[in-house]
Amino acid sequence: MGFPWYSTPWNAHLSTTNTNLDILVVVFYFLLVLGIGLWAILSSSRGTVEDFFLAGRNLAWWQIGAFLFASNIGTGHFMGLAGKGASSGIAVGAFEWNAPFILCILGWVFSPIYIKAGVVTTPRYLRKRFGGCRIQFLLAILYLFLYIVSKIAVEICTGAMFMKLVLGLDVYLATVVLLTVTGIYAITGGFAAVVYTDILHASVMVLGSVLLTACTFLKVGGYHQLQNQYMVAEPSLIREGNWTAQSKCYIPRPDSFHIFRDPITGDLPWPGIIFGISTISLYYWCTDQIKWHVSCLQSVKSTVVLELAAVPLPTLCWWWSCCPLVFEA
């Protein structure tokens, strides 16, 4: 039993590019994450509910900002967003380009209200606003379901895919390893342990993205060469076994380097880019993420945190959209 895209020949072809040093780096990173998590467990206070879930509200603004960034970016972006960029072009970056504007709305409009109300979750805010426990319980269950289906499942799947290709682990074993490592420091260390490990994640992701972007653009010869080569590129593998990729998945679109695309024929039409993504982002950033920035004590500091997290998003989403085009080209 297994996923069809994890067939043996494809995995064998991809795994030949990995050396012992690559595997050693991955293992070292897992151990480093566990070490930081254990250090946070031993050094932080978890005696009260506030200490466990909000780290005692004593975290610095830059720590919350780094966590907010790292909690949004993960394997789903590095593999899923990159794959979409390779197949359809740079318009997929609009999902992240939209975030800084919504984060500013959260920081200047929603955040002061949440902090003044003394709440750390949207269900609790609605309970205080309208009274009764049913609306709080219903919204909490709905948020939990949406988070598991739309985010956690995707991150686990792409993370397991990465470990399968790099370490050759079975996909189910890789899933267990990911959940175990995360659970050890998250459940025992609380919010403080998650923040400290996410600071490491954010640093590695930003530094790695910068280096990868520089290397790929030097290799392809710049942005204009990328445009020229991408439009005539064809993948070397379009079928395996009884699976064959559809032509629309690998033939470059004429509008690959356009952000705003035709509302009728575009795969990401411009009305959806402007209005649809903004509506979804209001839910995601202004209701899903409030506990993290409420960990800051003042609304002004919280606003600075959100704007800090907003700064790298447009640049990184442009990198993730363009870098896969280099490999496609």
Image: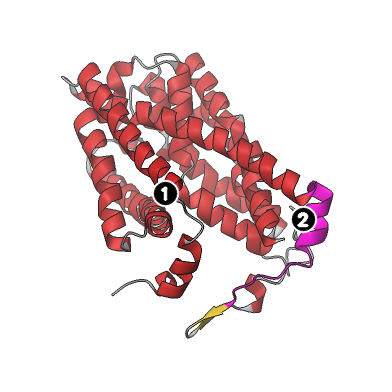
Q: Does residue 183 show up? A: yes
Residue 108 image position (x, y, % from top left) = 55, 24
- Counting labels gives 2
Residue placed at 79% from the left, 60% from the top?
229
In which image quadrant can residue 237 be found?
bottom right
Which of the numbered marks, if any, corresponds to residue 20?
Answer: 1
| Image quarter (top left, top right, bottom left or bottom right) of the N terminus | bottom left
Residue extending farthest front: 20
**Which amino acid is tagged 1?**
Asn
Residue 157 image position (x, y, % from top left) = 38, 58
Residue closest to the eye, 232 or 14: 14
The residue that label 2 is drawn on is 257
- The magenta span reads 221-238
| Image quarter (top left, top right, bottom left or bottom right) of the C terminus | bottom right
Residue 66 image position (x, y, % from top left) = 47, 27
| Magenta stretch encompasses residue 203 | no
Residue closest to the eye, 242 or 277: 242
For this view, does 88 lie left or right of residue 291?
right
Instruction: Looking at the image, tell me whether mark 2 or mark 1 is earlier in sequence order.
Output: 1
Disc 1: CA contacts within 10 A as few (<14), some (14-19) or many (>=20)? few
Residue placed at 77% from the left, 55% from the top?
258
Residue extending farthest left: 47
Residue placed at 38% from the left, 59% from the top?
164
| Magenta stretch encompasses residue 224 | yes
In which image quadrant can residue 52 be found?
top left
Q: Is 153 situated above or below 68?
A: below
Residue extending farthest bottom: 242
Disc 2: CA contacts within 10 A as few (<14), some (14-19) or many (>=20)? some
Badge 1 element: helix
Instruction: Nearest to the eye among marks 2 and 1: give it.
Output: 1
Q: Is 264 situated above or below 306?
A: below
